[in-house]
Amino acid sequence: MDHAADPSHPRYRSLLMRHRLEVAAKKGMLADSALIAHGRGEAYDYLLGETTIPSADFATRVALETLASATHPVLSVNGNVVALAGDEMLRLAHKLDCPLEVNIFYRTPKRMEALLSDLNERNERLGIDVEILGANPDATIPGLKGPRAKCESKGILQADVLLVPLEDGDRCEALVAMGKTVIVIDLNPLSRSSRGGSITIVDELSRCLENMLEMNVGDSSSTKKYDHHQTLQAALDSIVEGMKSKFSEQKE
Ligand code: ATP
C-alpha cells in the first residue's frame, strides 16, 4: 500500500501503519475503537525503541516451532491485524499450511464481509490459496457471551495451537481455558492477553510477522526453554531502560 511519507522520515513505519488503518477504516473493516487500541500499542513500541528485543526474538522462534509442530494450528485475525499485516498473516498461514480465521470482537455482517473480501483479494494478489474461515460460524467459545463467542468448528474450535495477535484479554483467557496453546503478539507486556497467553511475543505485529516469515521451521538451535514470566519481565525491563535512556539523551 503506497504512502506519501518519505521512507527516510524517522517515523515512516509508524506513519505507514497509521495510513493502513485509515484505509481499512474507510473500507468498513474496523471497529470504532480500533485506532485507540493501536495508539496504546504505539506508545509501548516507542518505549521499546521500535525494535525486536532479544526476548521477543526468542519467543518468536518458540512460537513458530510450536505452530509448525501442532496438529491443527489456526491463525486468528481481527480488523486491526488484517489492516496492519493482512499479507504477512496470509503468507504465514501458507508457510504453515494452516487456515486463518476471522474472529472479531464487535461482529457485524458488514464488517465480516469487508474483512473476508479484503483477505480474499489479498490471497489472489499473493497467488496463494489459504483457507479463510469465519464466514460460517457453527460453534461457540465456552465462557464468552454474544457474537464475540462465535467461531468455526473446523477452525478455532478444533485448533490445538492458536496465534492470536492483538487479542482481547477475555477471549484469550477463554481459549486458554479450553486447553489450547495460545500464542499472543502484543506490545503491552502488562495486558491480560500478554499475561494470560501460553507464549507471548512482546513485539510490533508486522515486525514480528516479518521475522517469523524469515525464520526457517525446524531451525531452532537454542536449547533454552521458554519461560513466560521471564519473557514478560524482560520486556518490562527493556521499557524501563528505554525510558531512562531517552530521558538522559534529553538532558545531554
Ligand atoms: P487486555 O484486554 O488484553 O488487557 P487491552 O484492553 O489493552 O488488553 P485491546 O484494546 O483489546 O487490549 O487490544 C489492544 C492491544 O493490542 C493492546 O495491548 C496494544 O498494546 C496491542 N497492540 C496494538 N497495536 C499493536 C501492534 N501493531 N502490534 C502489537 N501489539 C499491538
Image (cartoon, grey):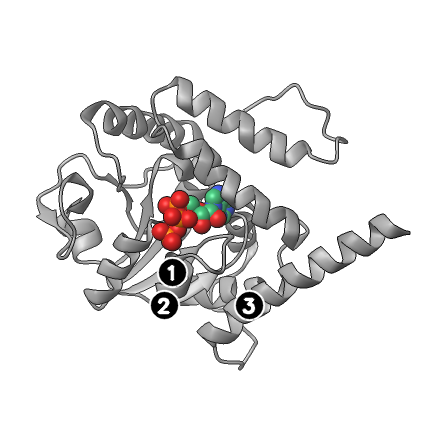
Res. 64 image quadrant:
bottom left
Q: In screen coordinates, is 154 left or right of 9?
A: left
Give the spatial CA distance, label 2 vs label 1: 6 Å
Residue at disc 1, secondary structure: strand
Q: Is mark 1 within 8 Å of ligand 1?
A: no
Q: Are marks 3 and 1 in contact (CB under 8 Å)?
A: no
* Tally of numbered discs: 3
Give the spatial CA distance, label 3 vs label 1: 13 Å
Q: Are marks 2 and 1 in contact (CB under 8 Å)?
A: yes
Residue 68: percent from the left, percent from the top?
38, 63
Q: Give the residue type at disc 1.
A: Ile
Q: Residue at x 55, y 33 (%)?
A: 17
Q: Give the residue type at disc 3.
A: Phe
Q: Is residue 166 visible?
A: no
Give the spatial CA distance, label 2 vs label 3: 14 Å
Q: Residue at x 20, y 42 (%)?
A: 148
Q: Is residue 38 visible?
A: yes
Q: Nearer the viewer, mark 2 or mark 3?
A: 2
Residue at disc 2, secondary structure: loop
Q: Is mark 3 within 8 Å of ligand 1?
A: no
Residue under numbered circle 2: 198
Residue under numbered circle 1: 183
Residue 82: percent from the left, percent from the top?
40, 35
* Mark found first going from the N terminus, 2 or 1: 1
Circle 1 packing at 10 Å, graded few (<14), some (14-19), many (20+), is many
User: In the rendering, which numbered label is found on residue 232?
Assistant: none
Circle 2 packing at 10 Å, graded few (<14), some (14-19), many (20+), is many
